[in-house]
Image (cartoon, rainbow, N blue to C red):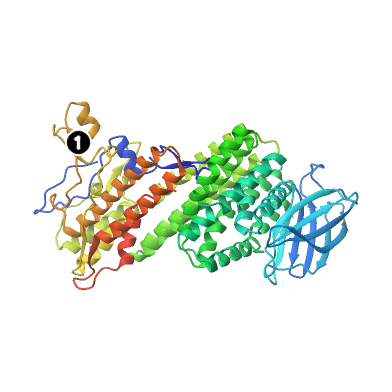
Amino acid sequence: MRRRLIVDFNELKLDYELDNEFEHVERSRRQCRVRRFTMKMSNMTKTKTHRHPEAVFALATGVLVVAVVLAWTTLSFGLTAGTTYTIEVDKIASDGTVTDLSLSTTATADSDGKLAFTMSGVPDNSSCNFLVITIKDNTGTVVRRSVVPCPNAGDTLPVGVSGITNAQADALIAALKAAGSDDPILVVFGYAIVRSSSINATDLSTMATIAQQGIDGSGGYVDYLTQNGVTSDQLAAYRSDIVSQLADPTDGYTKLFKDAVDTSDSSTAASKRGKAAALLLQILVKAATNAGFSQDRVIEAFNAMGAIVVPLMDQAVKDGTLSAKAKQMVDSSIGGGIDKIRAHRVMEKFSAALKSLGASGADVTQYQTAAQTLLDAMLNAFAEFDKVFNGNETQATIQAADQKLRTDMQTAFDTFMSDVAASNARLDTMIANIDSALGQATGLTRAEFQFYDSKGNTVNWAITMVIPTDWVSSIVSAGGELLYTRDTTAIPNSVTWLGTCSDQSYQDRNSCENAGGTWTAARTDFVADGVPTSYASLLGLKEDVEILEFARWDAQSNSGQDMSKEMQIEKQFADSMAKLVNNLGGTTNGTDAIGAKLLGALVILMQSPQF
């Protein structure tokens, strides 16, 4: 079972459905029995088994070089060959209003629908955050418009303008004016939310207002950051870095969107737009590191924003000011993006934790390859999803595309879990390391380090569990010891495999109680079962993490999708993980205490890689 975030801004709405990728959860639902790590030494007892078109621009600091390209054959979207157009560049001021820069020129579309020209005096992002580019025909009618980041000093800014950027510009100009700022955070969400040229004016206005409230409102995105230690200087650096990333001429959002506009094949263009959109929320996360605060605060801030946005969107649909189609677009687009950034963040944490515990060589390569394959697959799934936004999409087609997106994400995760499974040879090496650390043949076999998946297949431990076990063996070999004081959180009823039945022929709660027995929930006493102290500490930690994860999932399922409750649940879980770190101790060699970084790495690797 995996926690699946079903989005109604919906990684933000946090509904949960059951999936089958987390082996320790799934086996409990299906009463699968995990072969627990059991030392088969003469002095140990064996435990029982528990368990477009369009326009393409290049902006340079001080000089504006523009090319407008007819990328699709749909004439209603393209520029007319031989027609002269006026191109105007304005600035969005710090108060959110559009300021006239008196920058304009004219150009005539060539036979391919291209416009080419240069323009001097274009400001860089040392003096502004965003520009508004407007293309008008000879009657003064606006045919294309786009809000783009001010270029980095000395860089050229590639820009693609299309029907989608028209819709984005309408929403962003209204939202920034209402906010009274040129906030890059709001612009990123505007880009991410508005994914189609078919959105009507009412939907655009409603979404702009709701997004602005979710970001700037009390308890919203920015307020959460400031209430959780992010300083005003860090926020300023954060916003500046967002603009710089958007404007990156190599792989920034505007460059990727231009690549889509450059593409003549509509399907390929949609895929490229999807990859550009997938980058957006990742920019918000990456900018945190560059600004000097934790990426986790940003991911948490999404929940804070959702606590405001979700009920406002629901009410807007009821009031008739937001269409069901537009809401579905936001739900699916934001949800897929947040799934991806959560996955990216989890992969980073796991990778760092593995290296902290001494992982190297083939182990690191195996994990990093599996992680990159997962992230690439998620990116491709997101790109495929964007093909639904062709200007004729409906709520039903968006829902169908969203379901395919979820299926593709699930397939990617299943592949990841398979890719990180240790090989038989790697398990043999781990067992040999245990024997060496304990100075005797334990008689352990691979079976002690396997579990049953949801299909009843035997699967080897993941490399993320093998590495911590090897690390324990290394400190035991050096004369050290890992110590752990067990957590005392009550075992949830959903944890059906931890405990004993009055009728000892049954080993799980459901079978026991169905047969009329009395089930007594209890943690496994690994030391009493004969497991040496350091290894018992590791297994006890793993079991306690599982218990806390189940408590968290149960609480989420009972939260009624109340985002305030969801935030409290996440805070409680984070505090619980910190407590487990404090419950750990010991030495690496009998003298030197195990550092907090190593203990923290152990707790990270015992957690499920959920996104």
Asked whether residue 257 appears in the rendered view, the answer is yes
Where residue 473 appears, x then y in whole percent? 23, 62
Q: Residue at x 15, y 32 (%)?
A: 505
Pointer 1: what residue? 507
Q: Residues within 10 Å of mark 1 (few under 14, many from 20)?
A: many
Q: Name the image quarter holding residue 251.
A: bottom right
Q: Quadrant of residue 121?
A: bottom right
Q: Is residue 282 left or right of residue 144?
A: left
- In the displayed structure, does residue 350 sit left or right of residue 189? left
Q: Is residue 358 visible?
A: no
Amino acid type of disc 1?
Gln
What is the residue that sits farthest to the front in this orientation? 218
- Furthest-top residue in view? 515
Percent x, y of residue 572: 35, 51
SS label for mark 1:
loop
Residue 445 x %, y %: 22, 50
Judge from the rendering whether residue 275 lies leftward or rightward of residue 598; answer left or right.
right
Looking at the image, is 112 positioned above or below residue 74? below
- Residue drawn at (40%, 39%) of the image: 559
Location of residue 242 with respect to 513 vertically, above or below: below
